[in-house]
């Protein structure tokens, strides 16, 4: 009986996901360009795609850049998200409701819409960011170009991603924080424990499992990010010095119609992600399967 | 007492400031959409337009392909939600109510697949869809979205089903129904909020998706709303009609925001609806 129930999902996932993954491996062993695409037939070249990717300095630079980018994004998201959750606990009800409503609104913004708003706010000619920073006397930002260098391009992508990811982290952590027994915190405070000690010894143990899940989720999402950097930096401005892994796959594989090579890069990327997701999947199994 | 008060007030002030800071981009989008071009293109910004204009909204609505792309998106979303819900429901029942060999492996598969970055599967899916003539068709997009919506739907529905106590099922079975009968008569109504929440999540995911839509759908008349919106910028920095872009962005965000608010309440309802006092 349970097999009958699971069967449709297995069949579908096998057909639409298993087959492409098998096909991905096959493609990675072929020279598969535009002509091959039209003929539906590539030429077997063994591991040539992999060795050419692994000998490509751009691949290693992109990987390193993506790791640094992911680390920065995850640290900011989790750090600020934790601060926000701790703030939520300390607010009076109406301010908490207000802030929660704001967080949900930000959370609900479609990423593509958020990108447009970011482009508009950071526009060099009449973007509101330059105006505000100049008015606050933080320097002369008149017609400042926020996308002048790869570092700043990726920094702007980071601000966008952190802004969109904060609500999920803050609201989930707030829910976890409200599970922390009140009496315990009060008892610790009466015993004269400093607020940092209370946080470390009473609060942390309760929220650590949630924090772990949120962190691994953020790592996986940020490592594979595509839409935000692709659209915010702009398809015309993507160059090897600002590639992230997702962009690299797209540019080398799809845009240059070198599908075999793109498949090889995809496999390397998926392997890295799979290795990282082991932690997350094991956590989810523990939390989701209490019995 | 007074010290406690001032401290609490201090936090509240910070809370309001953080709220203003976080919500500002959304406010700026809506506010820009109602401004005149003059106000938009001036270096000194207008915070709240005193004489709001609907010109940008009308420009966005009358822009070519808007309604076609809305129609395409709705078709894609309906098919994706419909098919994935039916398939996911049965799998979720199996996961929540039965122990069977291969169950753990299936769960790992369901969770693990959600973690794969979609961009990693763009190459094989594009080549395969091309092979079967499904590039530039809505069917191709539906197939892809369906695959990505399915694991999430299974996992979420399973969460709703687990919340339903065994006693309810057993009561139904004592009344003489079969296990499947018990599922359909007792579980289905109880899990309805879960089905609603799951379909809304699937709706939001499909409505927001960009990567696969942009790779599979080439014709302007066959695109989705996210592609329609990104076509506004068109790579040119100079002559962007920001008023229209912000009006269009607002229009596209509205259904998602409304549905998102619904899900939040539905999830809370769904989690309590199945509860029985022991």
Image (cartoon, coloured by chain):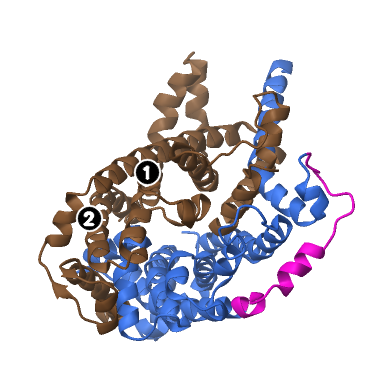
Chain colours: A brown, B blue
Label 2 marks a residue whose chain is A
Q: Is residue B34 left or right of residue A9?
A: right
**Residue B268 to residue B96: above or below:** above
Q: Nearer the viewer, mark 1 or mark 2?
A: 1
Q: Residue furthest left?
A: A46
Q: Which residue is mark 2?
A: A268
Q: Is residue A23 left or right of residue B91?
A: left
The residue depicted at 39 percent of the width and 71 percent of the height is B150
The answer to whether B38 appears left or right of B84 in the picture is right
Mark 1 = which residue? Answer: A241
The disc, 1 or 2, on the residue closer to the chain's N-terminal end is 1
Q: Are marks 1 and 2 in contact (CB under 8 Å)?
A: no
Query: Which chain is indicated by disc 1?
Result: A
Residue B87 percent location from the top left of the image: 39, 79
Pinpoint residue B242: horizontal percent, then vertical percent.
70, 55
Gap in angstroms between the C-alphas marked 1 and 2: 20 Å
> Which element carries disc 2, helix, strand or loop?
helix
Q: Nearer the viewer, residue A93 or A19?
A: A19
Q: Quadrant of the N terminus of chain B?
A: top right
Give me the disc on residue B127.
none
Same chain for mark 1 and mark 2? The answer is: yes
Q: Quadrant of residue B102?
A: bottom left
Q: In the picture, residue B65 is in which quadrant? A: bottom right
Indicate yes or no whether the magenta region holds residue B53.
yes
């Amino acid at each position: 009986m349970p097999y009958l129930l699971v069967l449709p999902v297995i069949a579908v996932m096998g057909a639409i996901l298993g087959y492409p993954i098998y096909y991905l491996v096959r493609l990675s062993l072929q020279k598969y360009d535009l002509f091959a695409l039209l003929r539906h037939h590539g030429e077997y070249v063994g591991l040539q795609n992999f060795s050419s990717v692994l000998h490509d300095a751009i691949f290693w630079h992109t990987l390193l850049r993506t790791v640094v980018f992911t680390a920065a994004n995850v640290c900011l998201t989790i750090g600020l998200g934790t601060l926000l959750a701790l703030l939520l606990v300390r607010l009076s009800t109406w301010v908490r409701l207000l802030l929660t409503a704001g967080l949900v609104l930000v959370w609900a913004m479609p990423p593509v819409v958020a990108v447009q708003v970011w482009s508009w706010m950071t526009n060099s000619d009449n973007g509101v960011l330059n105006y505000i920073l100049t008015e606050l006397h933080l320097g002369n930002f008149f017609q400042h170009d926020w996308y002048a260098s790869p570092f700043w391009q990726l920094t702007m992508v980071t601000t966008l991603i952190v802004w969109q990811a904060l609500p999920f982290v803050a609201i989930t952590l707030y829910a976890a924080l409200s599970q922390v027994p009140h009496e315990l915190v009060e008892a610790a405070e009466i015993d004269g424990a400093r607020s940092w000690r209370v946080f470390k010894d009473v609060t942390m143990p309760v929220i650590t499992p949630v924090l772990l899940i949120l962190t691994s989720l953020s790592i996986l999402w940020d490592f594979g990010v595509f839409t935000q950097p692709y659209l915010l930096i702009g398809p015309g401005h993507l160059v090897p010095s600002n590639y992230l892994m997702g962009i690299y796959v797209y540019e080398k594989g799809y845009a240059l119609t070198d599908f075999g090579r793109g498949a090889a890069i995809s496999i390397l990327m998926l392997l890295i992600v799979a290795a990282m997701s082991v932690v997350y999947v094991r956590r989810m199994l523990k939390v989701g399967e209490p019995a | 007492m007074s010290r406690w008060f001032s401290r609490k007030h201090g936090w509240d002030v910070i809370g309001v400031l953080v709220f203003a800071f976080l919500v500002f981009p959304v406010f700026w989008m809506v506010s820009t959409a109602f401004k005149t071009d003059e106000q938009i293109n001036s270096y000194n910004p207008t915070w709240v337009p005193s004489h709001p204009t609907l010109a940008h909204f009308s420009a966005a609505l009358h822009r070519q392909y808007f309604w076609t792309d809305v129609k395409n998106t709705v078709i894609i979303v309906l098919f994706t939600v419909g098919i994935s819900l039916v398939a996911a429901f049965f799998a979720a029942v199996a996961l929540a109510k039965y122990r069977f060999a291969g169950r753990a492996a299936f769960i790992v598969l369901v969770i693990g697949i959600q973690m794969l970055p979609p961009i990693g599967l763009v190459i094989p899916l594009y080549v395969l869809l091309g092979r079967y003539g499904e590039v530039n068709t809505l069917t191709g997009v539906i197939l892809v979205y369906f695959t990505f919506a399915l694991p999430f739907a299974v996992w979420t529905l399973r969460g709703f089903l687990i919340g339903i106590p065994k006693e309810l099922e057993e009561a139904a079975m004592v009344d003489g129904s079969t296990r499947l009968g018990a599922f359909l008569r007792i579980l289905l109504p109880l899990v309805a909020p879960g089905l609603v929440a799951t379909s809304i999540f699937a709706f939001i995911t499909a409505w927001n998706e960009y990567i696969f839509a942009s790779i599979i759908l080439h014709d302007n008349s066959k695109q989705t709303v996210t592609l329609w919106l990104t076509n506004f910028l068109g790579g040119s920095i100079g002559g962007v009609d920001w008023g229209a872009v912000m009006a269009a962005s607002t229009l596209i965000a509205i259904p998602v925001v409304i549905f998102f608010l619904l899900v939040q309440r539905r999830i809370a309802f769904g989690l309590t609806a199945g509860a029985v006092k022991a």
